[in-house]
Amino acid sequence: MVDDHFAQQLKARRKNSSLTQQQLADKLNVSRKTISGWETGRNRPDIDILRQMAKIYHISLDQLVSDADKVDQNQNSGIIRFTRNSLVVMLAIIIAERVTQYSTRAGFLLADILIFWILGLRILASRKGIRGIHSLKSDLFLGAYIIFVIVAIVSAYVYVFNMGFGLQYGIGFSGYLGLLNLFLIFRHKFELK
């Protein structure tokens, strides 16, 4: 039996690329059982196959054979850190505006909803949350984040006279910061593919 850790890395790389064993086998011109053997640690691919796999996954050979968790963590750590910090800044701004501004009941209700929304996004972006949803770029996180950004930006303009101007600017700024963050997440997502 070969290195079980390496076998798990091969399996993780294949799954991260959304390929089945059969699809990968077809691309490499090997059998599905061969792929299964690599992923269970019964045998190991030769260097030519590893080079082909690296091309399929759009990574270097070194990244393929190095520790997958460390490589993925290093690639994603900057964008994850920026996202977490952005969510904390948005939460602080909206809470501060909510507490300090004189506003109508509708403005306070909207601020309260957005505060809980940001808290939920921040929990999803936590270490435990990311493990649960498997990626900052998951459909659940991105969908909720997109809805938050749209609601924040639209409400900042629609309710301009129903909220205190400070609250309106705070919500608007949070929406635009979220929009910037989403742009960076999507840019990062497509750079890795």
Image (cartoon, rainbow, N blue to C red):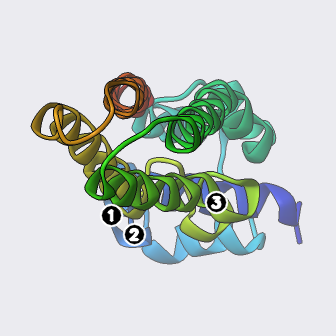
Q: Residues within 10 Å of mark 3 (few under 14, many from 20)?
A: some
Q: x%, y% of residue 149?
A: 30, 41
Is residue 133 shown left or right of residue 171? right
Amino acid type indicated by mark 3: Ile
Amino acid type indicated by mark 1: Gln
> Mark 1 to mark 2: distance in Å?
5 Å
Indicate which disc residue 20 carries.
Answer: 2
Q: x%, y% of residue 62?
A: 71, 26
> Mark 2 to mark 3: distance in Å?
31 Å
Indicate which disc residue 123 carries.
Answer: 3
Amino acid type indicated by mark 2: Thr
**Element class at badge 1:** helix
Q: Are marks 1 and 2 in contact (CB under 8 Å)?
A: yes
Indicate which disc residue 23 carries.
Answer: 1
Q: Is residue 42 above or below residue 145?
A: below
Q: Residues within 10 Å of mark 2 (few under 14, many from 20)?
A: some
Q: x%, y% of residue 176?
A: 33, 24
Q: Residue furthest left?
A: 158
Circle count = 3
**Element class at badge 2:** loop
* Residue situated in front as seen by the camera: 6 or 112: 112
